[in-house]
Image (tube, grey):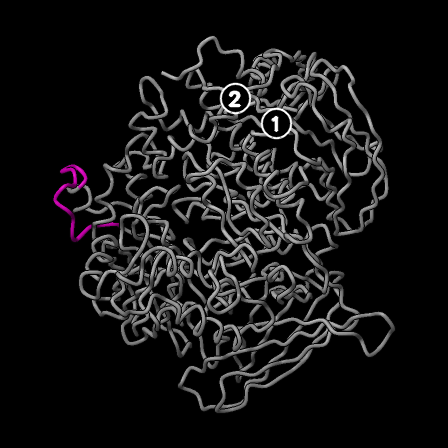
Amino acid sequence: MAHLPSTFRALHHGWTLTAPVLPDDVPATVAAALADGVPAIVPGEAHLDLRCAGLIDDPFDGANEAAQQWIGDTTWRFSTTFTWSDDASTRHDLVAHGLDTVATVELNGDVIGRTQNMHRSYRWNVRGSLRPGENTLTVTFAGPVPEAAARAQRDGALPHVNHHEYNQLRKMACSFGWDWGIDVAGAGIWKPIGLDSWSGVRIASVRPLVDVVPSTGSDGADDGLLRVHVEVERDGVRSDEDVPLVVTVTDPDGATLTASGTVSAGETSTVVLVTVPEVRRWWPVGYGDQPLYDVQVEAQAASDAAFWRGRVGFRTVELDTTPDEAGAPFLLRVNGERVLVRGANWIPDHAFLTVIDRDRYARRVADALEANINLLRVWGGGIYESDDLYDLADEHGLLMWQDFPFACAAYSEDAPMRTEIDAEARENVTRLSPHPSLVLWNGNNENTWGSVDWGWPGRLNGRGWGDLYYNDLLPRVLAELDPTRPYSPASPYSFGDYRHPNDERYGSMHIWDVWNRADYTVYARYKPRFVAEFGFQAPPAWSSLTAVVHDEPLNPFGPQMLVHQKANLGNAKLERGWKGHLPDPATIEGWHWTTQLNQAHAIRFGVEHFRSLTPHNTGTILWQLNDNWPVVSWAAVDFAEHRKPLWYALRAAYAPRLATLQPRASDEACAAAWEGLDPNPDTLALVLVNDSAQAFRGTFTVTRETFDGTLLAKATLEASVPARGAVTVTVPDEVAAFGDPTTEVIVAEPDDGTTGFTSAFWHGAEVLDQRLDPQPLQVEAVHTDDGCLLRVSATSYARDVFCPADVVDPAASVNDGMVNLRAGRSVTFRVTSPSGDPQAFAAAVRCANTLLDASERTLP
């Protein structure tokens, strides 16, 4: 929660955007407007200024992406004027907190600096270039696409995914496009820029590192140890002298304590140790509270003072990868307690970063927490995430895993790149060090895996591919600046010499044969220790999709639809994915529901299998929570902030207390069962996963019944589950053995509905082969002040009851979904909508059964 110093004067007004070098394919009207200059917003980006000036259409709409590729080829210049008068300050620094990316900075015609890296800040002493009165500041950015290509030509191309040479620049990789991301590589002043005028001394950085130790005072209490690493810069004008420091710590109740230190003359840094007696520990969500302590550092130099303010939470964190009889785990512990990770991967929440504000971050954090997610992994093709996101995570106990920004590519180890990476790592490790939610640093995304399996050696010609960073530079920086957090060199990673990096027996793994080529039931063949990536695609909400795709007629392979499907053969893979599970849809609306439903089924299947392996498996991280534009993707929440059916299925599968019915037999028998060759596996078991602090002891009633509710068999199972543990209870054969798998369902229901467990369902056949009533629902709508209540009743077994509220009102939301309803049971959905007819919402309710109601069975 660090703030800009009070001495900082933002220069955010009066900017103009021009283009000193334009490609030949720019429309003449655009070129003419840019010759005169258009207003620019700072912080901001060229794309956004062009859109505000009416020079381009919405980049996300239709096929505009291709028509606007010239923006990434263009040299952009941002210019402003400001007035300045000399004052008593001895230093006047121009500080750019974020320039994207290769830029030349000029003040009154003097080149004062050049930048190569959007992931770091730059500071220049500009006293010699400032003039009393009016001053002119310009920032000229090289077109990122030709700049990256030119460097590849000059220095040698290195392996990468996708079509641009993004690994040549320290620029957000996914701005060049990804298999879910739009290609909008552009330029801009994306963080604050301004003058920092100061005298004597300034606080250059603060790293408040925490520890918790047993108290030497009262029994059973803990003390917090706060080591405040302070670095100062002197103005170089006054004589070198001691710099007294005062550190003030304020606890959550407002009580304060102080400690003092000194940066001695001739030195630039020191450490102030603060002991916080009987400290209140910070805990992850579901483990305890999140007390935060305010920290203020004051530096005195003669009559001048400088301040830094932030927050910390006291906790310990470790990553256990100690080899065991099954391989080696990937086990996170916070305050010594094992954390079973229920995670999601995080990508930048908007293709244009400067649009993301704290409120948008807060809504995504709510999406995560309400889906029972306890960890976000900040993926390496994005950015070092903002303090806004980390502040929110601190406040809510949401754990954060931060990748260093390296993804799916080889990176030069030569001096220019190495120097920039060292600088960005030092700055961002320091910046993020106060946040208790940050529990793991990770070196790269899939680069170590790529070096083994993606044919790199023959293309590198002996050059390094980045391993120097992941196994030398980055761990050295962390050991120096933040040894309080664990580090993994890569994801996936197997923590051992000569092991394949994606070995399921060791450390973390990514599972991508499912989606790319295998049926989702193949998840059951894996017994991973920890899954850091896995996922399945589906389109966004109907209103999100149709707002940007205008093909006539709308169909999965229309030209604009394919602009919004970035995965290779993505919509063909969607079709392959539903085959054998769901009937072929008859309409585009049917395609939309089929693919969304299949995504939810695939992930629920995978998550429940992985969690049923607890404690062998210690976590899963879904790919992915969010989108950065309206697109067919793996996301649970689409760009327009609609929660897809996947989100509701994930919330259920990620419940702290999960009941799931799973086959438990030989590996061969399990595989046969998943392939549909044997609908009756050797053993059916009720697996109870208890990721809570309280042990569970109770009973479940397990029944086999027909879809009309006729009871065929029944048993009562007793179970005792320790806190943060799991147990497996065998279902008796007379209940587990289907008579007719196409007309029966097995249900395990807790006898006490207050335990936190919900019912588990086991099907002997896929929807495609089940004889489900295609119209099993009766819906009653009741108007409320903020929308309506939908009381949904089932006359026969209904799978995955859902209300796509956005088809009625794009601003609507619904509190529940993807509910299985047994015959005679009901559920009430609450729809929140600023407008929308309750009867229209009632008519929109659907379930998996309705897919069987189509008179046509093929999509035109």
Q: Position of residue 13 (x, y in %)?
A: 36, 53
Q: Position of residue 27 (x, y in %)?
A: 16, 37
Q: In the visual, does 563 lie left or right of 499?
A: left
Q: Are marks 2 and 1 in contact (CB under 8 Å)?
A: no
Q: Is residue 20 magenta?
A: yes
Q: In the visual, does 362 lie left or right of 472?
A: right
Mark sitting on residue 809: 2
In which quarter of the view is residue 525 placed? top right
Of the residues shown, which amino acid type is indicated by label 2? Answer: Asp
Q: In the visual, does 322 lie left or right of 33?
A: right
The answer to which of marks 2 and 1 sits earlier in the sequence is 2
Q: On the rendered image, what quadrant is the N terminus found in?
A: bottom right
Mark sitting on residue 814: 1
Of the residues shown, which amino acid type is indicated by label 1? Answer: Val
Q: How many marks?
A: 2
Span shown in magenta: 17-30
